[in-house]
Amino acid sequence: MVSRTLAGRGLRGNGWLAGRRAIAYLGGMDENAHIPAIPPLIDNFARPITYLRLSVTDRCDFRCTYCMAEHMQFLPKRDLLTLEELDRLCSAFIGLGVRKLRITGGEPLVRRDVMSFLRGISRHLGAGLDELTLTTNGSQLARFAADLAAIGVRRVNVSLDTLDEDKFAAITRWGRLPQVLEGIRAATRAGLRVKINTVALRGFNEDELFRLTEWCAAEGHDLTFIEVMPMGDIGGEAERLGQYWPLSDLRADLEARYRLTDLPERTGGPARYVRVEETGQKIGFITPLTHNFCESCNRVRVTCTGEIFMCLGQNDRADLRRPLRESDSDAPLIAAIRDAIDRKPKGHDFDYSRQQVTGQMGRHMSMTGG
Ligand code: SAM
Ligand code: SF4
């Protein structure tokens, strides 16, 4: 198998065989168990790229203050990849060894006919793809949870920064908390595991740290805190610095009440996990500012217009829409994906440590989906 594949495509970059072993190692599987038909994606820092985050829309039914401006200019529909193009793109990545696919946005569940796209892509589950999942604001989950479970989605991440109705309305501008809580309940009833993502915001949800933690423990949800990143213009540097609550401080606050045990669990992403001994729940910390974990990054992001971003915190990108549209063959698309992966940078440059925002990205988080 190995020699047939090598003969077919040739060795590339720092060697796909080493990369395949690395993938097997990271996945805790036998190194011969999953061998993509063509050489998988390995970047120039020997990181296997096995995780794709795909934004299917730039639109959203909320306007979270740290994510979007109140009056957003959205893209014309013709610029968006069609559902068929999204399917071709995902299938190409899966053929190249991507094993986890996270659908995001904007709000992914407001994209028209998103279920037919998800149903189609779910055919890869167990046939190359290990996991199909979503990051959502939860507003449409009551409508979609049962269908998501039926096509093989097992887990969803739901973003929730507060359990206070008025604060929720303020931070999301357009959102309503009861609708989101109903969506979360529907997801749980449908058998989906829910992980709550909470952006840590100084002066906003500091006073809810224990309430959020205990609510998640009681409801059986995992919880991950995220440091707010300088993505998009939301009203100036003072605003960004003012809302920055380092997770090292947040963790110290948690430790004042609970015993936390570090867990060895790694997902190839930026999260590090602890178990809260008193409740048994798992809490994650995503700390792009206080620590970055770029050396183990296994992911790339593709926007709804088909631009691939090799790093959330860098501007370099490549266009995948043109190769998708210019040929019925996937060869130009696959070549463009490989070229992009060869340019994946070592890491991002976000930094608030000198009391100023550096590494700021002009684009909003809703463009790449977080
Ligand atoms: N609309 C969906 C949602 O809110 O879950 C998916 C897209 S949203 C852009 C993905 C994640 O990015 C959310 O958890 C959101 O809280 C987070 N996010 C948005 N802007 C951020 C920022 N500036 N810093 C850190 N996280 C951010
Ligand atoms: Fe919409 Fe998600 Fe951004 Fe909030 S964080 S505005 S829900 S895309």
Image (spheres, rainbow, N blue to C red):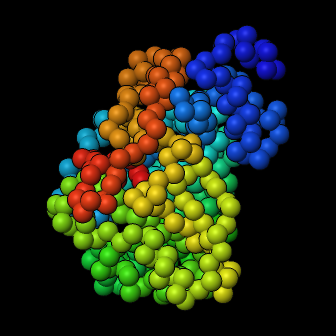
Q: Residue at x 70, y 45 (%)?
A: 26
Closer-to-camera residue (11/164): 11
Q: 220 above or below 110? A: below
Q: In the displayed structure, does residue 42 sit left or right of residue 302?
A: right
Q: Is 218 rendered above or below residue 248?
A: below
What is the x, y in percent for residue 322?
38, 23
How far from the left and from the top, in percent, is residue 320?
42, 28
Furthest residue to the front? 354
Give whichever of 297, 54 is nearer the camera. 297
Above or below, 6 against 280 in this view is above
Residue 156's spot in the image, x, y percent? 56, 62
Q: Quadrant of residue 148?
A: bottom right
Compared across the picture, whether 173 is left or right of 13 comes to left
Please identify the quadrant where the N terminus is shown. top right
The quadrant in which residue 185 appears is bottom right
Q: Residue at x 79, y 44 (%)?
A: 29
Residue 76 screen position, x and y as percent: 25, 41
Establish if 122 lies above or below 172. Answer: above
Instruction: Give the residue drawn at x 60%, y 66%.
Output: 273
Q: Residue at x 39, y 58 (%)?
A: 289
Can residue 230 be seen?
Answer: yes
In this rendering, the count of numbered labels is 0
Answer with left or right where residue 275 lies relative to residue 186.
Answer: right
Q: Kindly tell me whether residue 169 is visible in this rendering.
A: no
Say which quarter of the image contains residue 263.
Answer: bottom right
